[in-house]
Amino acid sequence: MPTNTDRIVIIDDEQRMCDSLSALLRNDGYDVASFRNSLSAVDNIRANRVDLVITDIKMPEMDGLEILRQVKDIDSDIPVILMTGYASLDTALEAISRGAYDYLLKPVEFTYLSLAVRRALEKRRSELERLRLVEELKLSNLILQRRVGELNALYEAGKQIGSTVNLQELLRQIVVLAGTVTEARRGSIMLLDSRKEYLTIEAAIGLEEEIIRTTQLPIGASIAGYVAQTGEPLMVADVEQDPRFKRINQEKYGNASLLCVPLRIKNNILGVINLANKEGNREFTQDDLRLLTNFASQAAVAVDDASQFERNRRRLVEFEILHEMNRELTHLD
């Protein structure tokens, strides 16, 4: 059954043939364009979507076999039906060998032509559907490969950050690994103070030491403060234009795209990870944001464990100092 997208081009140097075929095919519901000049017809096929070409073999500017060749060069899947008033077995065999869908003798019997057109268009639609499914499969495979790569990257990163309990070393590892898995050249990990009022940079890549040492952002201020306050990961297309971004230095970013995700354990926000300047001056993607968000979930657990370990270590040191002082006082008595 024809659809409103089926477009047929008719090429014949006889105006009467163009008119009669066009009228009959339009009556069947097809979108038809006819040409008496084969050069103009090929230009039109090259410039527009065409689903079927019906052409006479004997043409003054370019014969039907050459039209067939050029149509196949434009799109090898466009079916071509050749017509001729001069029957020749050799010509018919050559036409079929070059990829013609069918070969009809003039005067054309419209019943047979209608059947040939319907079958040719069904073949065309089937081929387009096959190509669409192939492209979908390729895209699905690319997505699957990307996801597998992300999972492998997260697994390896998780092993590395889970192997240390030294907080400062851990924070440095986290920001380096975050930059590696997202191809970011600049980044920082910022933690909230005990009162959860300010964010400070605890580790960074690609930032000057003065910026690391002096930066202190109130929660809710700038993109990092906004993410720490809301707990929602954020991808900003242009940090130079976003009104939530408060400049912490005057150096322009190599790329205006930025990622910021929370370090969160359930409802407890520990801080944020900021990344900028993706390799090749490319923009970050939603895949990068998802990957960094998943990585931050692992990192938050490691940071919380290391922080707890550090607190316990300090308490133990304090206890040992108090114990030693008590022992010395007892000895003096």
Image (tube, rainbow, N blue to C red):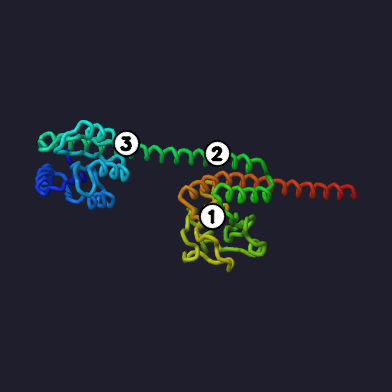
Please tell me which residue is depicted at 69% across the width and 47% down the height of the picture: 166
- Asked if marks 1 and 2 touch (Cβ < 8 Å), the reply is no
- Residue plotted at (76% across, 48% down): 317
Tell me the kind of residue under disc 2. Asn
Disc 3 to disc 2: CB gap under 8 Å:
no
- Residue 47 image offset from top left, x and y in percent: 28, 52
State the residue at coordinates (74%, 46%).
Answer: 316
Which is nearer the eye, 15 or 20?
15
Quadrant of residue 196 within the rendered picture: bottom right
**Label 1: which residue?**
280
Q: CA distance from mark 3 to mark 2?
A: 33 Å
Identify the residue at the far bottom of this view: 250
Is disc 3 placed on a helix, strand or loop?
A: helix
- Residue 152: numbered disc: 2
Give the vertical position of 300 relative to 201 (above or below).
Answer: above
CA gap, disc 3 and disc 1: 36 Å
Disc 1 marks a residue whose amino acid type is: Gly
How many C-alpha atoms fall within 10 Å of the one at disc 3: few (<14), some, or many (≥20)?
Answer: few
First in residue order: circle 1 vs circle 2:
2
- Examine the rendering and report whether any part of residue 60 can be seen: yes
Where does residue 291 sit, x and y in percent of width and height? 51, 46
Answer with mark 3 or mark 2, whichever residue precedes in sequence: 3
Q: Give the side of residue 144 with respect to residue 84, left or right.
A: right
